[in-house]
Amino acid sequence: MLKGKQSILFDDAPYIISSGSIVGKKEGEGPLGNLFDKVEEDNLLGQETWEEAESEMQKEACLMALGKAKVQPEDVRYLFGGDLLRQGIATSMGLEELHIPLFGLYGACSTSGEALALSSMSVAAGYGDYILAVTSSHFGSAEKEFRFPLAYANQRPLSSQWTVTGSGAFLVGKQTSHVRVAGVTVGKIVDYGLKDSQNMGACMAPAACDTICRNLEDLKYQPSDYDRIFTGDLGYVGQSILFDLMRKKGVDIKPNHADCGMIIFDQQTQGTNAGGSGCGCAATTLSAYILPKIESGEWKRVLFVPTGALMSTVSYNEGQSVPGIAHGIVLEHC
Amino acid sequence: MLKGKQSILFDDAPYIISSGSIVGKKEGEGPLGNLFDKVEEDNLLGQETWEEAESEMQKEACLMALGKAKVQPEDVRYLFGGDLLRQGIATSMGLEELHIPLFGLYGACSTSGEALALSSMSVAAGYGDYILAVTSSHFGSAEKEFRFPLAYANQRPLSSQWTVTGSGAFLVGKQTSHVRVAGVTVGKIVDYGLKDSQNMGACMAPAACDTICRNLEDLKYQPSDYDRIFTGDLGYVGQSILFDLMRKKGVDIKPNHADCGMIIFDQQTQGTNAGGSGCGCAATTLSAYILPKIESGEWKRVLFVPTGALMSTVSYNEGQSVPGIAHGIVLEHC
């Protein structure tokens, strides 16, 4: 079951039974707009703050995933959740009323991968028939958390990314579906010493490279064994660095690589610079775009690799670098 | 193996093979001072910032736990780690050089319980022979994160708690020792609507009550089946609320309850008001004080319940309440 240094291939692979995706207005206007379960016209979701709006999205995403599978919250054994905010308040404040025992996570934008990995590991080990994985991000709360107040209307460098307003939830369990989580590759922190928090793609690319190479080595796969390798939110800058790093290792993933941050927005018309980002980016793209193609059998095997840039306003104001981390999830049609 | 609504009793219980504890000067002057593995005279640990000092403590605690067990970092399959800081930077910046695949966690001061639960679940499921759990807190970085700059020298209400400067690390694995993790009870978010971030004991007590009662019900234990029930950092205020709440449920834990936050400092002489707190409080007390008594057989079974107050400066400035969470770890002499 343990494979190589960092991977697990499940003997009794759990399934993604259902999922839910909810996004904001801008995401709804993007290329995937008509694929999301719900597009909110009001980015505050009727709440008073961005943070409460983000909490509300997490809860709604969970309830949508549960509703599709006709599973009640009380039948969910554990919940793995996280977001980008300090002390994970979107998760803490949003999920209380579901009354599900909670493991709070932080892995920056890689958190959807972390949550899916731990949910799958827990189901495969028999720790629950139904386990939820949920993550979220919100443009308003993230700009406030990491950058500038929205009202300041700062200019954004071309390498910057646009935090996705959205939440994706996944019900993982033993009940069969057409998507199974065949395995996971847990990522390490990789630090190339980059310090530009407005160029997160560059900060995360080395971690993506490390996790993808490790996955291929651990499982003895070629890139072509995957129909697609999806990174979370490297964006245009990060993708080109990833290709460079992979080429140095003699691995070519160009033919089947895609990045959630590059497909969720239309860079040309939406002013999103290097692409989308945030815990909600990979999670909503997985739910709305990737899973249906695996369910239908169009893709037989996909490597889903959400990528995170580990930093805070404190760490970068103190001159620390921005290390990256990425977790790999092997999804298969069945 | 699954017990009741929230608990797991392991068929093949993992062991806490070794642990490491490192604390600051004030903790070294407290009642447990001579029990910690290392007392740092310099609370900056030779670093330039409190955050870097906290990172350094996490790394040292891990290396101490590994050193005692003569296990190399490369033999550790996964690491579960967390701290109190925004975006968990003490963990992100401290553990990179160990090169161990990382799951970043956030559960406020309950994180040591969360990390031990997930480490034990992973070892019991066969996901690794050695898995590390580590958490930390630092008085300097926590005051800056949650309250006021230290130089401001603000007055502290009597209900406030003193964040422990310290880190505890635990090597969990299949290799036998005299302490096994017999089971876990994963906690839910419990929100009584309290909004006073300077009275965290009161905010966390309902969660502690919920998890302890759930543990007793799930495992069909009486309080007397435990030699001790340790909460993480309820302090004096939180303990008295916990006793009230438990009495209303007809459960008396007074004879065998203890709180890490109440024993790590001498309230009378150290000016710590309601007691110690922080991810490092329960973790270092477990490592230095509780585990040796279980190892020796003085205590046969202990319920360890780290408690967390879920909040951020943003959530409480926006008028949100401070929900609590607590995770229960059943430790047995063997």
Image (cartoon, coloured by chain):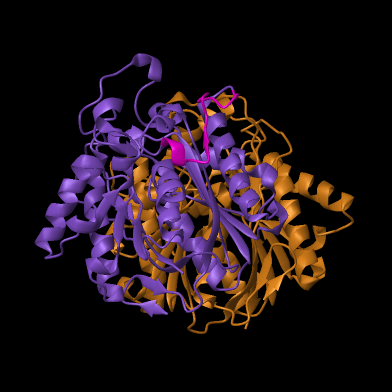
Chain colours: A orange, B purple
Q: Specify start and end residues of the magenta stretch as a single range.
A: B33-47
Looking at the image, residue A172 sits to the left or right of residue A306; the answer is left
- Is residue B140 shown to the viewer in this render? yes
Whether residue B40 appears in magenta in the rendering, the answer is: yes
B78, A17: nearer the viewer? B78
Residue B18: x and y in percent read 55, 55
Residue at image location 59% in from the left, 60% down from the top? B131
Q: Is residue A19 above or below residue A248?
A: below
Residue A75: x and y in percent read 34, 76
Q: Main secondary structure of the magenta part?
A: loop
Residue at image location 72% in from the left, 42% down from the top? A237
Looking at the image, residue B4 sits to the left or right of residue A4; the answer is left
- Is residue A16 shown to the viewer in this render? no
Whether residue B174 appears in magenta in the rendering, the answer is: no
Q: Is residue B91 above or below residue A8?
A: above
Residue B213: x and y in percent read 23, 65
Could you say which quadrant of the image residue B69 lies in?
bottom right
B43, A102: nearer the viewer? B43
- Picture mark count: 0
Residue B296: x and y in percent read 44, 59
- For the C terminus of chain A, the image quarter is bottom right
- For the N terminus of chain A, the image quarter is bottom right
Could you say which quadrant of the image residue A76 lies in?
bottom left
Looking at the image, residue A183 sits to the left or right of residue A106; the answer is right
Q: Is residue A64 above or below residue B36?
A: below
B168, B68: nearer the viewer? B68
A98, B303: nearer the viewer? B303
